[in-house]
Image (cartoon, grey):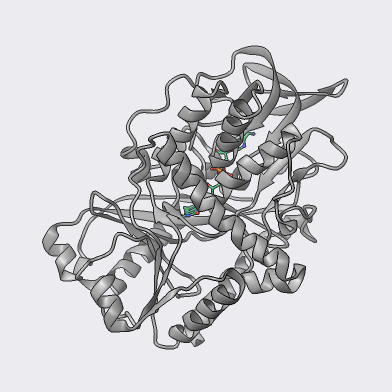
Amino acid sequence: MYHRIMYDRQVPVGSYWEASAGGPVAGCDSLEGDVTADVAIIGAGYTGLSAAYHLASVDQLDVRVLEAGAPGWGASGRNGGHCCFGGAGLEPHEIKKRFGEQVAKANIATQRESIELVDELATTHGFEIDKHGSGELCFAHKPAAMTHLRDEAAMWKALGGFDCELMSAQAFKERGFDGPNIHGGMLFPFGFGLHPMKYARSLAGLALSAGAVVHSQSEVKSWSREQGVHRLHTDRGSVRARKVLIATNGFTLDDLHPALSGTLLPGISQVVATRELTEDELAAHNWQTEHPLYDTRALFSYLQLTPHRRLVLGGGGGMSGSPRSSRFWERVLRRRIATVFPEWNNVEVTHSWRGFFCLTRDRLTHIGEIDNDPGVFYSLAYHGNGVAMATWSGRAVAGMISGRSNARIPDSMRQPLQRFAVPALRKSDVYWRYGKRLVADFFQ
Ligand SMILES: Cc1cc2nc3c(=O)[nH]c(=O)nc-3n(C[C@H](O)[C@H](O)[C@H](O)COP(=O)(O)OP(=O)(O)OC[C@H]3O[C@@H](n4cnc5c(N)ncnc54)[C@H](O)[C@@H]3O)c2cc1C
């Protein structure tokens, strides 16, 4: 669906996170020879690693993780570092409309729990993940956007029972940052910023220490079945297991499993990082906050100032995945920096990268077992907000796999996967979503 370079594990990702995370995780050799396990997991991002850790530690199962690159090679090691609410591509009021109020409330409770889970894992196990801020700060890029933020705050109060703090332009400029296009803001009370690759590698280390085996450079190339046992084949070996978890999210290829074919829609997000900003440069925009931030544009940007004072800013990444399109979207992000932070117009961008997030037709996260292929589980589609939710879903699907419990997974996440009406044309859905957002930004 996208340019082949997006899937090439030999091409450096080029992310600031990769460059600043220290060495790779030790003990993740590629799979050599034929082995057996209780559970084989495909993909070593947050979903696969969280599932591996919980299956190995809570259920004492023999777990093998097969990763085509290295742990965190996918979106987990290259995202914006917002540990925040998310998962579905629907707003809570839309979930309420489709599934009722109880499910919408359960969904919100799950999102809160997912952030707490990341925090708890990091604190309990001493992860060094550059955690910063408490909450997410949204800034209104035009006066009319404050109406939207007021409605949003009212919606969270009604369905989530918590307050979001609305800020005047002046208050935002005093507590967030100052700039020419700030018309107010909102402090969302949950979430924090982190270093995504350090977090992915910490999770990998935790899974290893719990007894799971993680194999890098071990892409699952084919899949056979022998008397109720699955056998996953890589270039140099195979894993036989009664249970398999598909945790490949936006990097899932259509031929991995027939039940998933045509059901997932990867989207691209591009990110840039600047060099370290000086104290004077930060003062020029009265930078005051440690919270991760985003804006109210329909084609929004998400950003954080790292503890090392680099601005990391991401947004849309286009629809082709070619190197040329990456350069185009990098220029778009540079322009966004110049618009929001004119004083930083000439600050060098040192890193630029992109990756796949994952959408579905019904815009829901999906956790489940494949109907006509017992023992094959999946946890997928966090719609660009999976730092917390993929961690939570990995734990949830681990409970399903071991037969412990799935009672706490909201109904909206247990719906069957839906194939796109014309899978070959599903990318037109991305064009449609981009188009709608461009129009919204232009006219509203
Ligand atoms: C640029 C960008 C910015 C983002 N920013 C944020 C953010 O700020 N906050 C937030 O909450 N979310 C964000 N997200 C989304 C978030 O990163 C993802 O939802 C989350 O990382 C998904 O984790 P995962 O483990 O399910 O998938 P991934 O981390 O994508 O891992 C899937 C893995 O499967 C492997 N794989 C695929 N096929 C095979 C195979 N056949 N054999 C073996 N391995 C295979 C891949 O190599 C990959 O490593 C962002 C995403 C992107 C791309």
Q: Residue furthest left?
A: 280
Among the 4 quarters of the image, the one containing residue 336: bottom left
Q: Residue furthest top?
A: 33
User: Which residue is more in the foreground, 361 or 58?
Assistant: 58
Q: Is residue 178 left or right of residue 71?
A: left
Q: Is residue 325 left or right of residue 408?
A: left
What's the residue at 38%, 77% (across, down)? 185
User: Which residue is more in the foreground, 319 or 133?
Assistant: 133
What's the residue at 74%, 55% (across, down)? 424
Q: Position of residue 168 (x, y in %)?
A: 33, 83
Q: Is residue 400 visible?
A: yes
Q: Is residue 435 above or below residue 375?
A: below
Q: Residue furthest front?
A: 161
Q: Is residue 39 left or right of residue 16?
A: right
Number of numbered discs present? 0
Q: Is residue 149 above or below residue 27?
A: below
Q: Position of residue 210 (x, y in %)?
A: 54, 24
What's the residue at 45%, 75% (across, down)? 296
Q: Is residue 70 visible?
A: no
User: Which residue is more in the foreground, 271 or 96?
Assistant: 96
- Where in the image, quadrant-wise, is ligand 1 located? top right
Q: Position of residue 201 (x, y in %)?
A: 44, 34
User: Which residue is more in the foreground, 293 or 19?
Assistant: 293
Q: Is residue 154 above or below residue 198?
A: below
Q: Position of residue 278 (x, y in %)?
A: 14, 57
